């Protein structure tokens, strides 16, 4: 009986680790896609940011 519980506990731990790794992989993939989109957006708009003016006006 004790061996069966040990095997079930080990199986539960392995499955939990696999689920956590899949979630982590999904999160990393999403952040890579976000970074790619931000990089493309930055290249599209000239690759630099405009400094905001002190009075809030949009600089030309």
Image (tube, rainbow, N blue to C red):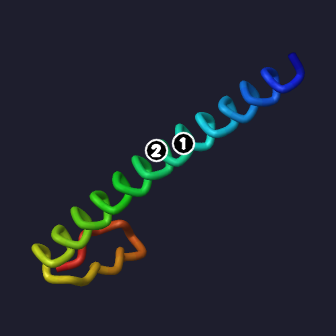
The spot of residue 28 in percent (x, y) is 42, 57
Depth order, front residue of 52/20: 20
Dot 2 corresponds to which residue? 22
Residue at the image position 83 percent from the left and 26 percent from the top:
3
The residue mark sitting in front, 1 or 2, is: 1
Quarter of the rendering occupied by the N terminus: top right
- 10 Å neighbourhood of mark 1: few (<14), some, or many (≥20)? few
Dot 1 corresponds to which residue? 18
- 10 Å neighbourhood of mark 2: few (<14), some, or many (≥20)? few
Residue at the image position 23 percent from the left and 77 percent from the top:
59
Residue lying at the far left of the rendered structure: 44
Residue lying at the far right of the rendered structure: 2
| SS at mark 2 in the image | helix
The spot of residue 60 in percent (x, y) is 16, 79
Depth order, front residue of 57/16: 16
- Snapshot quadrant of residue 54: bottom left
| SS at mark 1 in the image | helix
Depth order, front residue of 6/49: 6
- Snapshot quadrant of residue 33: bottom left
The spot of residue 30 in percent (x, y) is 35, 52
The spot of residue 17 in percent (x, y) is 61, 43
């Amino acid at each position: 009986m004790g061996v069966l519980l040990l095997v079930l506990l080990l199986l539960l731990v392995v499955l939990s680790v696999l689920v956590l790794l899949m979630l982590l992989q999904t999160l990393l993939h999403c952040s890579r896609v976000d970074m790619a989109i931000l990089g493309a957006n930055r290249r599209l708009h000239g690759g630099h940011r405009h400094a905001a003016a002190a009075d809030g006006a949009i600089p030309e």
